[in-house]
Amino acid sequence: PSLEKDLLPLYFGWFLAKRDEDSLRKTSHEFLEQLGNLKAFKKRLLAYGYEDKHKLDLLKHFAKTPNILHCTAKFCDYGKAVGSEEYARQEVVKKSYSKGYTLHITALFATPRTVGARLELTEEQLLLWPLDAEREVMPKDSFPRGSRAHITLGTAAEVQDVQTGIDLLEFIKLQQAGREGESLGELTGSVAGKVSYFDNGMWMVNLSRKIEVKSIFSGYYG
Ligand code: 2AM
């Protein structure tokens, strides 16, 4: 046994392969462009803090985009976050490290704060999902495991990345309460699907064809 402790990363997660990352960035632009051009969206600009439809460019609104597109599995904060050592010590985490995984994107969503992709984790991927991932940010509600799984695609200035998963759980909470959202049109092409509106500037498109992206499970130490 070594006396030295393993270094813990800022977070463990699935990192998109370069080619799929480039293509998902394009898909994200396409989503924001089509969403921003919807008549229904233009009528509901106030939620985004704009009164004049000529002033809102969604691509500019989400000023920050992550350097590396990924789905965070466990945020460790180099070991400062609760449960990081226990997480890293798990056999399944060690054995999955640097293995390839296909991620399944089922929906894209935008709120005044964040834009993201909703993921449907496989049974195998759920083994790497922390038991308290949902409770950690929304302790008062209960969600199926993996509900928070997402890829942050962008955030508005002053908004932290961690907000994307909170926004996603907000959508799911409404859906669990039986709210389907208002059906307000369809997007086409690579982002084809029905658009639902959930008040307060919360938009989601359920993709007619899931988007698959290749990824590698690893740690980010930057
Ligand atoms: P994200 O997973 O929603 O994109 C580095 O900050 C990464 O860790 C980001 O990808 C960020 O959000 C995620 N992150 C930051 N704080 C977190 C937290 N408290 N819980 C889970 N993930 C967090």
Image (spheres, rainbow, N blue to C red):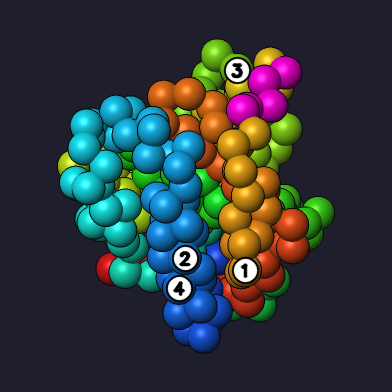
Residue lying farthest to the right in this orientation: 123
Above or below residue 182? Residue 141 is above
Magenta stretch contains residue 73: no
Question: What type of secondary structure mainly makes up the magenta span?
Answer: loop
Circle 4: residue type: Lys
Closer-to-camera residue (106/18): 106
* Cα distance between the residues tagged 4 and 2: 6 Å
Which mark is nearer the camera, 3 or 1?
Answer: 1
Lower position in the chain sequence, tag 2 or tag 1: 2
Residue at the (55%, 65%) spot, across then down: 14
Magenta region: 178-182
Above or below residue 6? Residue 176 is above
Closer-to-camera residue (67/184): 184
Q: Which labelled disc corresponds to residue 30?
A: 2
Q: Mark 4 and mark 2 in contact? Answer it, CB < 8 Å.
A: yes
Q: Is residue 71 visible?
A: yes
Q: For the residue labelled by badge 4, is the local secondary structure a helix, a strand or a loop?
A: helix
Q: Which labelled disc corresponds to residue 26?
A: 4
Q: Which labelled disc corresponds to residue 168?
A: none
Residue 201: image location, x then y, percent: 41, 31
Q: For the residue labelled by badge 3, is the local secondary structure a helix, a strand or a loop?
A: loop
Which quarter of the rendering shows the C terminus? bottom left
Which mark is nearer the camera, 4 or 1?
Answer: 1
Which residue is label 3 attached to?
141
* Cα distance between the residues tagged 3 and 2: 33 Å
Q: Is mark 4 within 8 Å of ligand 1?
A: no
Which residue is label 1 attached to?
189
Lower position in the chain sequence, tag 3 or tag 2: 2
Above or below residue 171? Residue 142 is above
Q: Mark 2 and mark 1 in contact? Answer it, CB < 8 Å.
A: yes
